């Protein structure tokens, strides 16, 4: 938890308790259903929770914002963001049912009331959202083809509605189709840990 407190020192008691509960819950569930690499579970807060919260450094979602977490796995970035933004509404979807079970059980255990997790492929999702968030599930052009139908037209945040992804490495080729509108924000500008070098928040307005 120290790494969360380091960068987010204005959390409420409820938020602090919810973040603190994640370690035991994910260790317990990961022993039954592998949603995080076994060798990476000790890095839960840096590599998964704080990484997810980089989106919360990029944009402060207004109350009432609707967010779809596409390919959430065991709940990233959706669950950490739902803790950080309790007045926003999150839907988490994934094509693997057992991973959604973990996300649902974790959300229930920590008392998150602003999250719905559903076993669903992106092509099947019919709802409309202000933002789609994701952690490098597929190349951006493929993702955009699937989720463009789910972006609501009216924008209420400081940024226009769109897609916000966590991605690393060389992104030049896959972002080429969006070169005039894409915004690439290096996570290392917010978090100093070595692991975040060459990791980015990618935003494409729709």
Image (tube, rainbow, N blue to C red):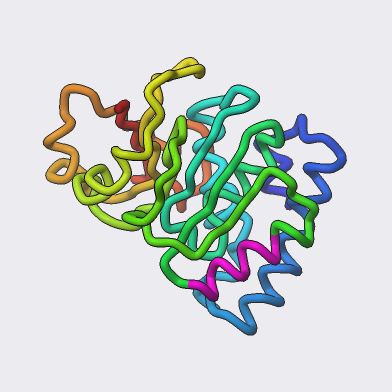
Whether residue 193 appears in magenta in the rendering, the answer is no
Front residue of 118 and 143: 118
Front residue of 142 and 194: 142
Q: Residue 172: x, y in percent?
A: 16, 41
Q: Is residue 24 above or below residue 50?
A: below
Q: Is residue 181 above or below residue 176?
A: above
Q: Is residue 92 above or below residue 187?
A: below
Q: Residue 140: x, y in percent?
A: 24, 46
Q: Main secondary structure of the magenta part?
A: helix
- Which residue does the image show at 66% across and 34% down from the upper left? 85
| Residue with the most extreme front position | 126
Q: How many marks?
A: 0
Q: Is residue 23 visible?
A: yes
- Which residue does the image show at 73% across and 68% down from the upper left? 25
Q: Is residue 201 visible?
A: no
* Left or right: 86 as drawn, with respect to 17: left
- Which residue does the image show at 50% across and 37% down from the upper left? 55
Q: Is residue 56 above or below residue 160?
A: below
Q: Residue 81: x, y in percent?
A: 60, 42
Q: Quadrant of the C terminus?
A: top left
Front residue of 161 and 10: 161
Please tell me in which quadrant of the rendered image residue 144 appears: top left
- Residues drawn in magenta: 97-106
- Which residue does the image show at 42% across and 58% down from the upper left? 71
Q: Residue 8: x, y in percent?
A: 69, 35
| Residue with the most extreme right position | 13
* Left or right: 89 as drawn, with respect to 141: right
């Amino acid at each position: 938890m120290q790494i969360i407190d380091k960068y987010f020192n204005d959390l409420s008691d409820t938020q602090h308790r919810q973040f603190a509960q994640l370690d035991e819950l994910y260790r317990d569930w990961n022993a039954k259903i592998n949603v995080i690499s076994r060798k990476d579970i000790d890095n839960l807060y840096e590599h998964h929770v704080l990484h997810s919260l980089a989106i919360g450094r990029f944009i402060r979602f207004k109350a009432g914002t609707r967010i779809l977490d596409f390919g959430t796995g065991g709940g990233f970035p959706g669950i950490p963001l739902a803790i950080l933004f309790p007045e926003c509404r999150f839907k988490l979807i994934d094509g693997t049912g057992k991973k959604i079970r973990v996300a649902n059980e974790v959300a229930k255990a920590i008392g998150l009331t602003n999250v719905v997790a559903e076993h669903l492929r992106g092509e099947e999702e019919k709802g409309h959202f202000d933002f789609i968030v994701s952690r490098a599930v597929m190349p951006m052009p493929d993702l955009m083809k699937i989720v463009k139908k789910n972006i609501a037209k009216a924008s209420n945040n400081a940024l226009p509605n769109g897609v916000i992804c966590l991605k690393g490495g060389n992104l030049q080729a896959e972002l080429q189709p969006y070169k005039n509108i894409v915004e690439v924000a290096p996570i290392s500008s917010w978090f100093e840990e070595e692991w975040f070098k060459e990791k980015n928040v990618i935003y494409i307005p729709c």
